[in-house]
Image (cartoon, rainbow, N blue to C red):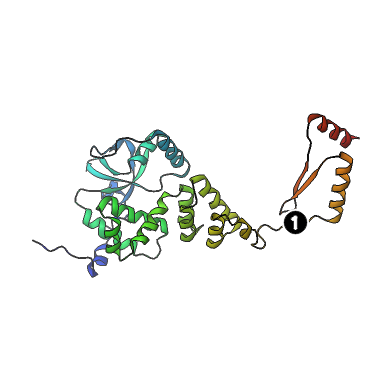
Amino acid sequence: MTKKRALGKGLSALLESASTDITSSRQSLENSNTVGAIASISINQIEANPFNPRTHFEEDALDELSNSIKEHGIIQPLTVRKLGRDKYQLISGERRFRASQLIGLKEVPCYIRIANDSTMLEMALVENIQREDLNAIEVALSYQRLIDECNFTQENLGKKLSKSRSNITNYLRLLKLPVKVQIGVREGLISMGHARALVSAGDEKHQEFLFTKILTDQLSVRDLERLIKGKETEISKISSRSPKIELSDLVESSKTNLETKLKTKINIKSGSKGGGKLVIDFQSLQDLETILNELNS
């Protein structure tokens, strides 16, 4: 029996060739037929995997995914197996495939595999994970591909990469974040620390709200963690981000005079950019008419 070659010094030499680095090759498939390249494939050329154990997909979840794809595109390419001339079979990504069909996409981005290229895929992904220029989402997607397509468990993957199981888990959890947040990580708008904190910050709407707040208020990871824990008072102490505007003596005096004239409570709310709101309370339509008459007199 031939001994399986371990990953080692020969791996870098193997992947120096664009034809064997199957996770990063961008050559035209029409000219080179490079298996492993990421390519746009006509959705009509792809058939579902008949052996997929999952046959039921929630309609609401598919609709949400369809709307996300319509707005942001497909973040994680599908994986297909080349069957023959212009024919492919889905290996993973059936929800993305069905959602793309729902919104009428003509083409979808795909990783292309052949039946016996598992060893090369494994080596290429492991090599690419070691690159320093990968962002957290790219690392997470590589971990997920090794689990889905090379049949690794999280524990075995950790041993393979000399990583703790918690490290693998933390990266994989990032793929549960809303697409908008994942794009933010990929584009460097927020850090891995921000993303990890957002994972446990509630539902998608709240995660997206906090993502926007990170950008607008320039929150640090520690600020975000405090906010998630409900310590808004500590966040409010952060200088220069939401300064409290003190009302001048003239404004306070005018407010008092107006309350006396209208015989109701007046609230003045000042914003951080000089604007604000003047709120006049009334208890009934009759009160409102009286107030309007006083203002017009």
Task: Residue at 72% x, 51% y: name it.
Answer: 271
The number of numbered badges drawn on the structure is 1
The residue closer to the viewer here, 28 or 117, is: 117
SS label for mark 1: loop
Spot the residue most to the right. 297
Q: Amino acid at mark 1?
A: Ile
Q: What x and y, as percent, mark residue 208?
A: 52, 48
Quadrant including the N terminus: bottom left
* Closer-to-camera residue (297/230): 230
Q: Quadrant of residue 156?
A: bottom left
Where is mark 1, residue-wise? 245
Point out residue 286 in the picture as x, y percentages from the top left corner.
82, 29
Packing grade of label 1 (10 A; few <14, some 14-19, many >=20) is: few
From the viewer's side, name the closer residue of 243 and 83. Answer: 243
Q: Is residue 241 left or right of residue 286?
A: left
Q: Give the residue at the far left of this rendering.
A: 1
Q: Position of residue 200 (x, y in %)?
A: 47, 53
The quarter of the rendered structure image containing the C terminus is top right
Measured as percent of width and height from the top left, residue 264 is found at 83, 40
In the rendered structure, the answer to whether residue 71 lies left or right of residue 287 reads left
Instruction: State the residue lying farthest toward the top.
Output: 286
